[in-house]
Amino acid sequence: MKEEQQILNRMKDLGERSYKVGQYTFSGFLSQSEQAVFLQKEKEFHLYGFVLNGGWKEAERRLVRFGNPLELGYEEEFPICCVLITPLLKKFADPLTHRDFLGALMNLGIERTLIGDILVFDREARVFCVNHIAEFLIENLDKVCHTSVRCSIDVGEIPDFEKEMTEVIETVASIRIDAIIAKLFKLSRNESLELFRQKKIFVNSALCENNSYPPKPEDRISVRGYGKFIYTGVNHTTKKGKLSVRIKKF
């Protein structure tokens, strides 16, 4: 509760500063859990006006911008930059993971709130960060694990990660989010329920604490520590009365 109140106090300070000074203010990148705390109290922040953005349409980590364009009389872009990290010799590069890239960034002493999503694709990474550290990354990040890398400002399009998703068919007794998660990640019922108690389940970026929630087609479900997937619907009913469901797994 203390951490949650600290988040709300920080957001309130930013909102009040924007309102009093008449200019936009921005938070650091918030995790999904932090966003959930903020959005649960969103009515308290409508006076200031706010928008969330993480640099790309499916962003999990996002900044909050306080300020109403109609009242301020101008628009201001989010101070988000995308840095592309590329191995110098891709064919000899280690099979680098999200954890590898994040670890390399943290080893530079960068605060986590300055880094947004890290998208890993074909041994490259696209790192969303606040503008003022982009040049620092370009100048200082030259190795991830044992792989030498170069950094540059990414001006291309974000790869369509949905094209790389794997479609999975699972059989469940009922359309419940806990049952689908347990089946997909090979967990016991108790292990699945524990994830809800630990507030690690998010549906369309919003915290989900209802383990019996029936997912709707195209719901994007994130399970911290395990992965994320898109529920696409019921395939058919089996002869034993169970339901075959379609899932796109990242």
Image (spheres, rainbow, N blue to C red):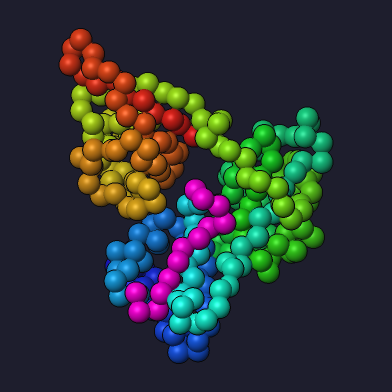
Residue 51: image location, x then y, percent: 45, 66
Residue 4 appears left or right of 88: left
Residue at the spot x=20%, y=10% of the render?
A: 239
Outermost residue to the left: 241
* Residue 166 at least partly seen: yes
Residue 228, position in %: x, y? Answer: 43, 39
Position of residue 233 relative to residue 108, above or below, is above
Quadrant (top left/top right/bottom left/bottom right) for the N terminus: bottom left
Check residue 210 for magenta coloring: no
- In the picture shown, does residue 192 fall above or below 26? above
- The image quadrant of residue 38 is bottom left
Residue situated in front as seen by the camera: 187 or 208: 208
Task: State the extent of the magenta-drawn residues as a range.
Answer: 46-58
How many numbered markers are drawn?
A: 0
Q: Residue 244: where, in percent of width, then height?
A: 29, 20
The image position of residue 87, as x and y in percent, is: 77, 41
Q: Nearer the viewer, residue 189 or 49?
A: 49
The residue positioned 39% from the left and 29% from the top of the image is 247
Q: Residue furthest top?
A: 239
- Residue 47 in magenta stretch: yes
Left or right? Give the position of 234 relative to 152.
Answer: left
Residue 186 seen in this snapshot: no
Work out whether 215 lies above or below 155: above
**Main SS of the magenta segment?**
loop
- Quick one: which residue is furthest to the bottom in this view? 20
